[in-house]
Image: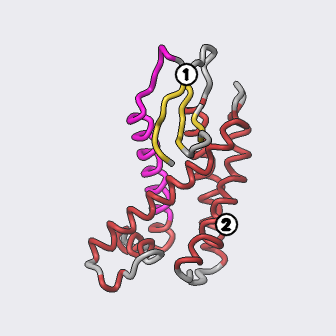
Amino acid sequence: MLSLDQSGIIVMRQNASAATPSGATAGILILVAAAMGAIDLAIAAIYWNLPLDRILRSVARWFVDVRTMAPLAAAMAGAVVQLAMMLLMILGALPLGRLLESERASLRIAMLGALYGGAFYIFQFHILLPLFHPLPDLGLRWELACFADYALLLGPCALTLVHLLAWPSPTHRGHTVVAPA
């Protein structure tokens, strides 16, 4: 099971015969976060009918002044910010992993994923990001589209990953440190 220990280290409990290297688990987390970020960015690019680099520069504006940056550097900063947000979303789903421990977890993943995705959307866009940069009002249609993206795609995706990485084996015995939190 993937979880946080008392010192804030991500720990994966595993079957000794089917040990997953910590680097592989971290790689999977990053790969899935990148895929989730790509889905989110593609939805924004399609919705706004804008090139991806422009969407990425807009994401970078949440934390840096892109007016002083070259367009490529600003787009790269946006990609890093997007990846960080999706990693935060996955790591935030870790405590929900215990609620998914059953053979019939798919319904729970769908329901909890929608709730978690919607809650994370509200946290990200209405609590966290406004602390760093005032966000423009982009209209109710965009707000609903973005909320649906988080509730119907990103939240269930994050919980599915947590479930797949945390599925306890019948002979579960040890712990392996995965990455610092």
Q: Is residue 162 left or right of residue 82?
A: right
Amino acid tagged 1: Gly
Q: Is residue 139 left or right of residue 12?
A: right
Residue located 43% across and 40% down the image: 26
Q: Position of residue 10 (x, y in %)?
A: 53, 40
Q: Helix, strand, or loop for circle 2? A: helix
Residue located 47% across and 18% down the image: 18
Q: Helix, strand, or loop for circle 1? A: strand
Q: Position of residue 147 (x, y in %)?
A: 64, 64
- Which quarter of the rendering shows the N terminus? top right
Q: Is residue 105 above or below residue 116?
A: above
Q: Is residue 74 above or below residue 110?
A: below
Q: Position of residue 113 (x, y in %)?
A: 67, 48
Mark 1 burial class by Cα count in 10 Å: few <14, some 14-19, many 20+: few
**Is-magenta flag for residue 20?**
yes
Q: CA distance from mark 2 to mark 1?
A: 37 Å
Foreground residue among 158 and 65: 65
Mark 2 burial class by Cα count in 10 Å: few <14, some 14-19, many 20+: some
Residue beneath disc 2:
122
Tell me which label, 2 or 1, sits earlier in the chain. Answer: 2
Look at the image and give the residue range highlighted in magenta. Answer: 16-43
**Is-magenta flag for residue 110?**
no
Residue located 58% across and 39% down the image: 162
Q: For residue 174, which numbered disc appears in the image?
A: 1
